[in-house]
Image (spheres, rainbow, N blue to C red):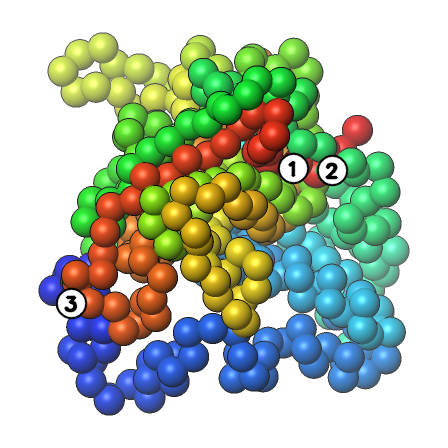
Amino acid sequence: YKFYLEAGTTKNLAKLMGDSIYFWQELYKHPDLDDWWKARNVRNFVQNIPQNTATLVVGGLFDAEDCYGAWRTYEAIEKKSKNNNRILMGPWSHGQWSRGEGNALGNIRFDSNTSWYYQNEIEVPFFIHHLEGKANIDHLAEATIFFTGDNKWRNFQEWPIKNMKMTPLYLHGKEKLLWTAPASKNNFSEYVSDPAKPVPYTEDVHFRRTNAYMTDDQRFASRRSDVLTFQTEILNEDVTLGGTVIADLFTSLTGTDADFIVKVIDVLPSDFQYPDERYDSGRNGSDFYPMGDYQMLVRGEVMRGKYRNSFEKPQPFVPNKVEKVRFELPDVAHVFKKGHRIMVQIQSTWFPLVDRNPQKFVNIYEAEESDYQKTTIKIWHDNTFPSSIILPVIK
């Protein structure tokens, strides 16, 4: 963090680092998707997996290093290879499937030792079966997925599953989320994004980036004027999501570029607490983090606006022209329980997870401090421009 703060811009950061880190210099030369990046994309080569080689793609729902790669690698193998291929996703941070108990991440609990279950019931039998021909793995489904919210493992014979329906949840005025499209005219919500005062990724200040931010409480962000917040009424039945989330936004801005961070959040009931949770009304506060009205981050993702139409050919925004920004968030497997709410937050900075966008159409690696500018961003939600978050709802 100190390094970033002293540098101020990506260009100055490169100067501080000099030529000592070759890979950094290579990244610096390739700001857009090109052959250099394509050569490093494992999905372009999975067709070379031998047909008699079994693969088990394992990943974490809250892998802060890469919660995208496992889903898409499995998908690519299914499309391009003819081998025995399966996927398993647990409620883990990066590598948590191989260490620790996997019964919690940050303030969120999962009710069982999920890492132990994977290691003993899946991983060991899988290797013994394929390497020694001994263990029985008939119980291993095509897709073994842990669903947070109700904290249960579920088995599927395909992923995505057939009875999943992509269902839009529409943004409305007065910070509402509804399953019906808006009927109003000329309706939008707006905020001013200032690169000099970016929205942090977590409420606390840390020396290192945390893993637990993937399930962190987002109430601190809800209180900021540069974060739009929309939520449903209290749910009268469970809503189960399993698959890819799509942000389908209509936006206009006063600048020529901006980032769009979309977060899908589970708002816990006001009286929610874990069974052993105790509160001390004395001067020392509570023994546990207060979970009533907790805004659990289920999934967050960023789209750099200039790549909205192509990662290979960036395009500037036309100031004040309404344009569509549509992008995928990595897959989710989560149950929003009856009595909870679904919340969506939209913002344009997420520091320091995402480098600051000058909000001016430039090569950000070469941006000067003078290029960084405030921008007013409108998210439209009316009958002409019905912004929505499209959710993979499982019935």
Q: Quadrant of the C terminus?
A: top right
Q: Earlier in the sequence, mark 3 or mark 2?
A: 3
Does dot 3 land on a helix, a strand or a loop? Answer: helix
Find residue 108 and report its horizontal and vertical position in percent. 46, 34
Residue name at image x 81 percent, y 67 percent: 79
Residue contact between numbered discs 3 and 1, judged by CB atoms under 8 Å: no
Q: Name the residue that disc number 2 marks.
A: 166
Query: Does residue 368 appear to the left or right of 289 in the view shown?
Result: left
- For marks 3 and 2, give the CA distance: 43 Å
Disc count in the image? 3
Closest to the observer, 272 or 389: 389
In the image, residue 143 above or below residue 276: below
Residue contact between numbered discs 2 and 1, judged by CB atoms under 8 Å: yes
Q: Name the residue that disc number 3 marks.
A: 7
The amino acid at mark 1 is Ile
The amino acid at mark 3 is Ala
Closest to the observer, 52 or 165: 165
Find residue 145 and report its horizontal and vertical position in percent. 70, 46
